[in-house]
């Protein structure tokens, strides 16, 4: 069945070559190298790249305990996996030895990953999956690095400590102090859970499989089941070719920690409590696709499909202004998500979130491969085509035109230069939005930028295509 699916989509590299380009490799190496030179061992990790202002084009960093710290080392290890397992995929100039590339990536990956071992001991955040899994999992799987496995299991213990049986969920945040319409100062009477948490469940599932600690997986299953009713909203809308329920998502739910009852729904990063924040929807797609992979619970597969259908419906039905005409005919931008599907749209400059598209595409790719394994080839093709449409359009619309390359006659450290002098942008992708919630503090709101996790999911999508034999 996989062969049939692969044959149907053999010309996948049409419009997708940037996933495997020298520019992609060069930008990740440059960021990891340059940031390390001024920050070794790392205590600050790259997060955003503004598209305007005095820091335009340059990564802005956050302290090591911020939730995005795992994505740069994750990107490095994703490229290292390619260099080890799929060297033929690397579109490099002939002067670059793959063995040299492997050594550079391995050194950089370890330099950025090793300081994060201390974060695996935390119990004050649910973001341990994001902070640990992108780099510690490949360290374990590629090199059987026992320190990496120990970090994964320690992080799972910390995440599990935040599970409360009466709620049936893992606590996301301990407090909330940056919204004007909602404040939580204590854990005593409030229990905050965000939809993003679904992507941290993979840490519990994976640690359970590696350690034999079944309580980790049991908590992840219960958390995923709880959010089916607290965070997923059944929609009346339909999408041609799919006859089951479509789901949108709440971003934030506050439970009573004593009874498990829902006290309040809201959004911390989307437009409003009733809107659908596109990245939240994307986290749900990826999280439920992963949850089904590990648990084989049919309700999680149904959720992943219904969430994907709603995401695609909103892309297809967005205002005409999101699709921009391009020279030579055709359009671009239709499949680069608006930052929130229900927020007001500036018809001249629609605000988008390219990272939401990349996260959703990764979830749909997993979903497609899962359905293909179940013999559901029609649905599998549907979600593979959806994922490809998102990624191709993201490359067309959001790939930074300021490219990088590996210099010729360079040293063993690999010198990275701008393809065009003085034409510089650190991130691979543009047009991402961290937060534009009207009720959020101004320091929390930012848009039109590159994001380290947008680039991670871009790189990881390409590596996943290689793992699945789709390119």
Image (cartoon, grey):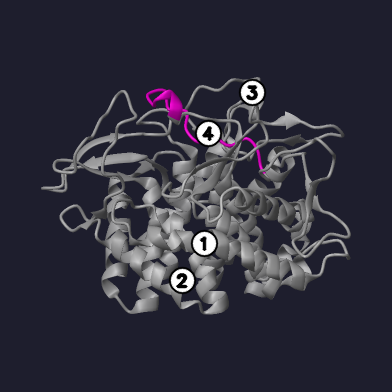
Residue at 27% x, 28% y: name it: 182
- Residue 295 visible: no
Residue 24, above or below 208: above
Residues at badges 1 and 2 in contact (C-beta under 8 Å)? Answer: yes
Q: Mark 4 or mark 3, which has the lower sequence index?
A: 4
Q: Residues within 10 Å of mark 2 (few under 14, many from 20)?
A: many
Q: On the rendered image, what quadrant is the N terminus found in?
A: bottom right
Q: Is residue 129 left or right of residue 142?
A: left
Calculate the distance from the C-alpha at mark 4 to the C-alpha at mark 3. Answer: 12 Å
Q: Mark 1 or mark 3, which has the lower sequence index?
A: 1
Residue 148 - label: 2
Residue 339 - label: 4
Q: Is residue 172 magenta?
A: no
Residue at 42% x, 23% y: name it: 438
In front here: 328 or 316?
Answer: 328
Q: Residues within 10 Å of mark 4 (few under 14, many from 20)?
A: many
Residues drawn in magenta: 429-443
Residues at badges 4 and 1 in contact (C-beta under 8 Å)? Answer: no
Residue denoted by label 1:
113
Residue 349 - label: 3
Q: Quadrant of residue 298?
A: bottom left
């Amino acid at each position: 069945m996989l062969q049939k699916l692969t044959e149907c989509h053999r010309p996948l590299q049409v419009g997708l070559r940037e996933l495997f380009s020298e520019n992609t490799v060069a930008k990740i190496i440059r960021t990891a190298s340059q940031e390390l030179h001024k920050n070794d061992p790392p205590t600050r990790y790259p997060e955003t790249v503004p598209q305007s202002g005095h820091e335009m084009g340059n990564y802005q960093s956050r302290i090591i305990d911020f939730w995005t710290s795992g994505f740069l080392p994750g990107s490095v290890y994703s490229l290292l996996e390619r260099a080890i397992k799929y060297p033929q995929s690397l579109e490099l100039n002939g002067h670059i030895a793959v063995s040299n590339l492997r050594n550079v990536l391995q050194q950089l990956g370890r330099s950025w990953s090793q300081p994060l071992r201390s974060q695996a001991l935390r119990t004050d955040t649910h973001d341990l999956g994001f902070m640990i899994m992108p780099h510690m999992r490949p360290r374990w799987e590629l090199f059987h690095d026992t320190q990496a496995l120990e970090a994964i299991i320690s992080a799972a213990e910390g995440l599990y400590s935040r599970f409360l049986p009466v709620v049936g969920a893992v606590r996301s945040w301990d407090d909330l102090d940056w919204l004007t319409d909602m404040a939580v100062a204590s854990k005593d009477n409030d229990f905050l859970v965000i939809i993003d948490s679904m992507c941290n469940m993979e840490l519990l599932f994976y640690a359970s499989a590696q350690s034999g600690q079944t309580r980790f997986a049991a908590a992840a299953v219960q958390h995923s089941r709880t959010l089916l009713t607290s965070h997923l909203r059944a929609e009346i809308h339909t999408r041609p070719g799919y006859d089951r329920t479509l789901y949108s998502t709440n971003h934030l739910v506050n439970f009573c920690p004593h009874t498990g009852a829902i006290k309040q729904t809201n959004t911390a990063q989307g437009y409003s409590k009733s809107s659908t924040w596109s990245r939240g929807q994307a986290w749900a797609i990826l999280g439920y696709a992963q949850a089904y992979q590990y648990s084989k619970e049919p309700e999680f597969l149904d959720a992943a499909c219904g969430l994907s259908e709603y995401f695609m419906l909103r892309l297809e039905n967005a205002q005409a202004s999101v699709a921009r005409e391009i020279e030579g005919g055709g359009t671009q931008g239709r499949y680069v998500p608006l930052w929130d599907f229900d927020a007001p749209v500036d018809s001249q400059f629609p605000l988008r979130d390219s990272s939401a598209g990349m996260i959703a595409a990764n979830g749909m790719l997993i979903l497609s491969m899962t359905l293909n394994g179940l013999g559901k080839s029609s649905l599998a093709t549907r979600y593979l085509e959806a994922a490809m449409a998102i990624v191709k359009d993201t490359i067309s619309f959001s790939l930074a035109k300021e490219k990088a390359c590996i210099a010729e006659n360079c040293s063993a450290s690999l010198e990275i230069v701008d393809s065009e002098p003085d034409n510089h942008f650190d991130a691979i992708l543009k047009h991402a939005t961290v937060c534009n919630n009207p009720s959020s503090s101004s320091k929390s709101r930012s848009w039109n930028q590159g994001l380290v996790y947008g680039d991670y999911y871009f790189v990881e999508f390409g590596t996943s295509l290689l793992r699945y034999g789709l390119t």
